[in-house]
């Protein structure tokens, strides 16, 4: 024998309103992020850096930096690197202003700001 459940009109309207609100909310919030996730952003030369700073790098103790994509360390426009002698890296450590670090920093800024333009 089948059981039949009866709910009141107000309860049915409330359930329907809740379902519609959830559906609209999910589609509204997920749509821009789904579009952004569907396309990739190139990191350019910034992908070669494990640490890429702007106002200098401070190391507080013995540190090992390694990476499969890149393990370079650098900072632009302030190339200051405090305690760089305690860093063991499989990549290049840039302690002076270098063109490669400047270009990588520009690529990083472009990679961060480009997706924002796609969402707007």
Image: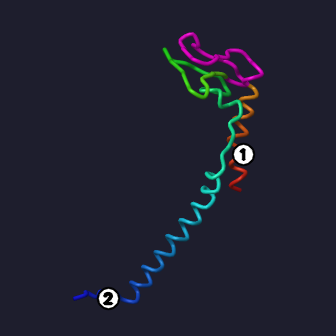
Q: Which residue is mark 2?
A: 6
Mark 1 residue crowding within 10 angstroms, few (<14) / some (14–19) / many (20+): few
Instruction: Classify residue 4 as left or right of residue 41.
Output: left
At 54% from the left edge and 21% from the top edge, which residue is drawn? Answer: 65
**Distance between the alpha carbons at the discs numbered 1 and 2:** 54 Å
Q: Residue drawn at (56%, 17%), measured in percent from left and top?
A: 89
Q: Looking at the figure, which quarter contains the C terminus?
A: bottom right
- x, y (%) of residue 58? 58, 20
Q: State which region is magenta.
A: 75-101
Reply yes or no: does residue 6 show up in magenta.
no
Residue on which disc 1 sits: 114
Secondary structure of the residue carrying tag 2 is loop
* Residue found at the very far right of the displayed protein: 99
Magenta stretch encompasses residue 78? yes
- Pinpoint residue 83: horizontal percent, then vertical percent: 57, 13
Within the image, what quadrant is residue 110 found in? top right
């Amino acid at each position: 024998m089948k059981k039949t459940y009866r709910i009141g009109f107000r309860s049915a309207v409330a359930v329907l309103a809740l379902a519609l609100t959830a559906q609209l909310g999910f589609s509204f919030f997920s749509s821009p992020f789904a579009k952004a996730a569907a396309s990739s952003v190139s990191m350019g030369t910034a992908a070669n850096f494990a640490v890429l700073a702007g106002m200098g790098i401070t190391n507080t103790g013995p540190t090992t930096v390694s990476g499969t994509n890149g393990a370079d360390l650098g900072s632009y426009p302030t190339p200051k690197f405090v305690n760089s002698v305690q860093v063991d890296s499989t990549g290049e450590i840039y302690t002076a202003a270098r063109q490669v670090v400047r270009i990588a920093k520009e690529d990083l800024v472009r990679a961060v700001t480009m997706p924002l333009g796609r969402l707007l």
